[in-house]
Image: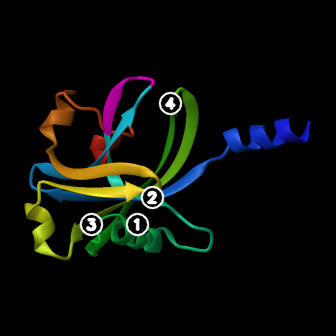
Amino acid sequence: MCFAIVLLLDMSKIRVLSLGIVRDGDRLFLSEGYDPVKKQPFYRVLGGGIDFGETSLDALKREFQEEIQAELKNIEYVACLENIFTYKGKQKHEIIQLYRCDFVHPQFYHIDEIKFAEGDRKKRALWIEIQRFESQELKIVPEDFLQYV
């Protein structure tokens, strides 16, 4: 019986994230993901989980440093979003602290892609034209995200 309670608590966990919109003209710097159940790629701005005792701003800076060794500037708070969705056939729930920001080092605006690891998952980040999401050629998450770019 205790095992069932622990499992139930784990399934109902809300993840708190700090994410950063980096825009260069008509394109966004995004991380690529894939849902094997839906057999569908998707894209999201970079960032990650906020650790206990850490501010969302500090988490944003730390995540960009850990994932792609990038420093940020011109950081501006945008909104707090709530995202309830299905991934790998399971319901997920996130609270997102969303920021707009720029890269400190200009070389990040001239790269095609950066490969990085997030835990044991291999990922890549790349520049993608916003129009590809507006036309629904590609999927960006959360679904109503484009209103914030």
Q: CA distance from mark 2 to mark 4?
A: 19 Å
Q: Which residue is mark 4?
A: 88
Secondary structure under the numbered disc 2 in the rendered image: strand
Location of the N terminus (image quadrant): top right
User: Magenta residues?
Assistant: 37-42
Q: Amino acid at mark 2?
A: Gly
Q: CA distance from mark 1 to mark 3?
A: 13 Å
Residue name at image x 11 percent, y 60 percent: 111
Which badge, 4 or 3, comes first in the chain's sequence?
Answer: 4
Q: Position of residue 126 (x, y in %)?
A: 20, 51
Q: Position of residue 9 (x, y in %)?
A: 75, 43
Q: Choose mark 1 or mark 3, whichever is in front.
A: 1
The 10 Å Cα crowd at callout 4, few under 14, some 14 to 19, many 20 or more, is few
Q: Which residue is at the front of the view, 116 or 29?
A: 116
Q: Which mark is residue 48?
A: 2
Q: Is residue 92 magenta?
A: no
Q: Choose mark 2 or mark 3, whichever is in front.
A: 2
Q: Which mark is residue 63?
A: 1
Q: Which residue is at the front of the view, 147 or 42?
A: 42
Q: Amino acid at mark 1?
A: Glu
Residue name at image x 41 percent, y 72 percent: 62
Secondary structure under the numbered disc 4 in the rendered image: loop
Which badge, 2 or 4, comes first in the chain's sequence?
Answer: 2
Callout count: 4
Q: Is residue 5 left or right of residue 60?
A: right
As drawn, 148 above or below 85: below
Secondary structure under the numbered disc 1 in the rendered image: helix
Q: Say if mark 2 contacts mark 1, CB within 8 Å.
A: yes
Which badge, 2 or 3, comes first in the chain's sequence?
Answer: 2
Q: Amino acid at mark 3?
A: Cys
Q: Which residue is mark 3?
A: 101
Q: CA distance from mark 4 to mark 3?
A: 30 Å
